[in-house]
Image: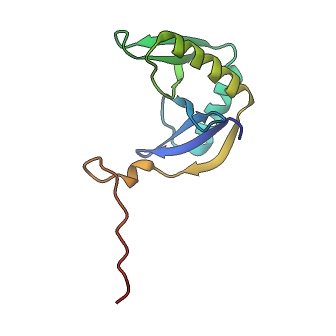
């Protein structure tokens, strides 16, 4: 499998994420969009500028690191996860840059995963099937 940008619904907004060949999240959009075409265009722009764009490493006091990609001093993408060590975060930036350069933008919109959650944040389990009597 190859790296790809996916668009998905999240709390009523359309976001994008970059998945690596191993299906793990490498990056995600910083903001949500009102239409899939806008999210796809943003993902394509990020892919185009990724090799040379400014990337800042951010830490919350040294215990977790993440990166943020800036275009004209505006945050456009962030790491898909946080990293325990700064070096891991630096390596993640390199993986992101390489994957974004060859990734395609999917035309499919994935459903909102939050809808599968109950009101208290627990996953809603499927009801057990009753045997025929």
The residue under the point 68% across, 27% down is 99
Say if residue 67 shows up in the picture: yes
Q: Nearer the viewer, residue 83 or 17?
A: 83
Up the image or down, 111 lies above or below 18; here it is below
Q: Nearer the viewer, residue 109 or 33?
A: 109
Up the image or down, 4 lies above or below 131; here it is above
Image quadrant in which the N terminus is located: top right
Image quadrant in which the C terminus is located: bottom left
Image position, residue 122 (x, y; %): 30, 49
Write down the quadrant of residue 7 in the picture.
top right
Image position, residue 68 (x, y; %): 51, 18
Image position, residue 20 (x, y; %): 63, 33
**Furthest-left residue in view?**
120
Up the image or down, 43 lies above or below 11; here it is above
The residue under the point 56% across, 12% down is 90
Q: Is residue 126 left or right of residue 30?
A: left
Q: Is residue 17 left or right of residue 58?
A: right
The residue under the point 53% across, 31% down is 28
């Amino acid at each position: 499998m190859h790296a790809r940008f996916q668009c998905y619904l999240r709390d009523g907004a359309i976001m994008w994420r970059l998945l690596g060949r191993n299906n793990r999240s490498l990056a995600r959009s910083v903001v949500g969009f009102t239409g899939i075409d806008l999210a796809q265009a943003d993902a394509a722009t990020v892919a185009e500028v990724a090799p040379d764009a400014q990337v800042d490493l951010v830490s919350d006091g040294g215990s977790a690191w993440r990166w943020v990609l800036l275009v004209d001093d505006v945050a456009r993408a962030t790491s898909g996860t946080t990293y325990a060590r700064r070096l891991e975060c630096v390596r993640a930036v390199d993986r992101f840059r390489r994957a974004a350069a060859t990734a395609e933008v999917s035309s499919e919109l994935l459903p909102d995963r939050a809808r599968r959650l109950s009101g208290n944040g627990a996953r809603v389990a499927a009801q057990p099937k009753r045997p025929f009597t």
